[in-house]
Image (cartoon, rainbow, N blue to C red):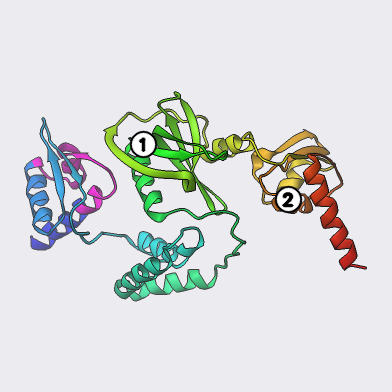
Amino acid sequence: MTSDMTARTLRLLSLLQTRREWSGDDLADRLQVTVRTVRRDIDRLRDLGYPVDSTRGHAGGYRLAAGTDLPPLLLDDDEAVAIAVALRTAAGGLRGIEETALRALAKLEQVLPRRLRTRVTALQQSMSGIVWETRGPRADPALLSTLAVTCRDHEIVTFDYTTRAGTTAPRRVEPQHLVASGDLWYLLAHDTGRDDWRVFRLDRITGVTVTGHRVPARALPGDDPAAFVAEKLSGAPTRHRAVATVRASADHVRTHTRYLTARIRPVDEATCVVDASDDSLTRIARTLACLTADYALDADPDVLDHLRATARRTLHATG
């Protein structure tokens, strides 16, 4: 009897961790018990330190709330392995998280069963990562975490946003998705002041305030938030213009460049256009160097001067 109750309580905890809110009827149906038994099990979780909030109503509702201390989390085998591997590689894109990730990893691996430690080690030994040079500021983990929660809960936030031109203005938005591109993170959100979708770079966001006001989820623009953000970025103004007409198919170019897909536009089966425009002359040269076919270039004079100077240095170095 006691073991059944313990197993059911753990199952209840697992359910509460997978959804923001459950009705009493739903939990009772999942656990195959009465609503009254669910209420007793909820009280047991509270006695163990889990902050479970309840709401009044016909069947009542329950959600696992934030507390003053972090209670133990219930993870299945696959979740534990995924978290351990992610912690081992967490230093790749977030500023200041390396030491914190190592501390968390040490705690997790201390309690992992031997069979799971073996899986984690095997995965890590078979994985390799390429560390590219930093092309921009990394994201603040605290900001990333805050916005991730507001995206999940559809909660309006306000912040100050600095544009590329250096002007700062207050914004009020409904966060929807976070999208990573290289070292940069972007927030896809519906700007309530402009009544339109906008893309915000996280390193240009300051003074975030979570309003506590939740709104219904909006229909996203398109099926793929990352593709939408890529398209928005491809149309954003840049300091230097460089557009290459490449004598190769778009598919061929995509397989040889690490560039945004939205910047590659097919013309026909043997030709495509690559928009290599950027704020950095060095990145433009790097993108064009990745093209493995002949191309004609339409670019600003400063881009052409930079490319000619680079070519002269290369020719001089090779004799």
Give percent across and percent down for residue 236: 61, 35
Instruction: Name the one closer to the observer, 79 or 312.
Output: 312
| Horizontal side of residue 167 vs 22, given as left or right | right
Label 2 amino acid? Answer: Thr
* Residue placed under numbered mark 1 in the picture: 158
Crowdedness of circle 1 by 10 Å Cα count: few (<14), some, many (20+)?
some
Give percent across and percent down for residue 32: 16, 45
Bounds of the magenta span?
Answer: 13-35
Q: Residue at x 31, y 75 (%)?
A: 110
Instruction: Name the one closer to the observer, 257 or 213.
Output: 213
Q: Residue at x 59, y 59 (%)?
A: 134
Res 80 quadrant in image: bottom left
Label 1 amino acid? Answer: Thr
Q: Residue at x 19, y 59 (%)?
A: 69
* Residue placed under numbered mark 2 in the picture: 287
Farthest residue, direction top: 195
Give percent across and percent down for residue 149: 34, 45
